[in-house]
Amino acid sequence: MDRSTSQPSAAVATAPVEAAGTLYDVSDLRLYNGDGGDAGPPTQATALHDASLRRTADGVILFSPEYSGSLPAATRNVIDWLSRLPTSWADKAIAFVAMTPGMRAGAGVREHFSAIMGYQPTRLFDTLGFGSYGDRLDTDGEITHTDTVHEPAGFLAARRVRR
């Protein structure tokens, strides 16, 4: 487990019983290119889109690190694919959680995410950030800080989506 997967894993593991979650690895997702011709979306983008937007999911929670005060390419790529595939995420609940080494708890990436998502027809929730992850993780990338394990579950429970 590494820093990029420890918090999402903990959030799913500690989520309320009535909340089910699925983690998706997007590290191999082809970069979105609006001028890409007729190649169509990759299978991985379609699967992520179908699972999170077309089916029974009440919402989407994006977990991301902060790179140089902003979104890493992989996170931005997910946003680009999900916002452009045939069935949009109109009215879908969206939450964002960042974990960073800095003391600002990902303020830059969270502000940037909120600005980008302001152009999308979603129901955007407040963001959640965790700073100083070096104090929260052990050498294997496992979360050892109790509040860091349980706070995402409380954050998600407080934002339950009712159909």
Image: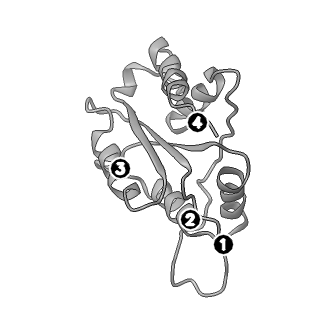
Residue at 39% across / 62% down in the picture?
A: 119
Image-quadrant location for residue 76? bottom left
Q: In the figure, 90 relative to 98: above or below?
A: below
Q: Residue furthest front?
A: 163
Q: Which residue is mark 1?
A: 41
In percent of the image, x 51 and y 39: which residue is there?
4
Secondary structure beneath label 1: loop
Q: CA distance from mark 3 to mark 4?
A: 19 Å
Q: CA distance from mark 3 to mark 2?
A: 17 Å
Give x and y (percent) for residue 24.
Answer: 65, 46
Residue denoted by label 4: 161
Q: Cα distance, mark 3 to mark 1?
A: 25 Å
Report which quarter residue 47 is drawn in: bottom right
Q: Helix, strand, or loop for circle 2?
A: helix
- The percent position of residue 55, horizontal first and vertical second, equals 73, 52
Dot 3 amino acid type: Ser
Quadrant where the N terminus is found in the figure: top right
Question: Which residue: 54% across, 53% down?
Answer: 91
Q: Are marks 1 and 4 in contact (CB under 8 Å)?
A: no
Q: Residues within 10 Å of mark 1 (few under 14, many from 20)?
A: some
Measured as percent of width and height from the top left, residue 160 is found at 57, 31
Amino acid under disc 2:
Trp
Q: Is residue 102 left or right of residue 14?
A: left
Disc 1 + disc 2, Cβ < 8 Å: yes
Residue 81 got which mark? 2
Say few, some or many: other residues with alpha carbon within 10 Å of mark 4 (under 14 / 14 to 19 / 20 or more): few
For the image, the number of numbered tags is: 4
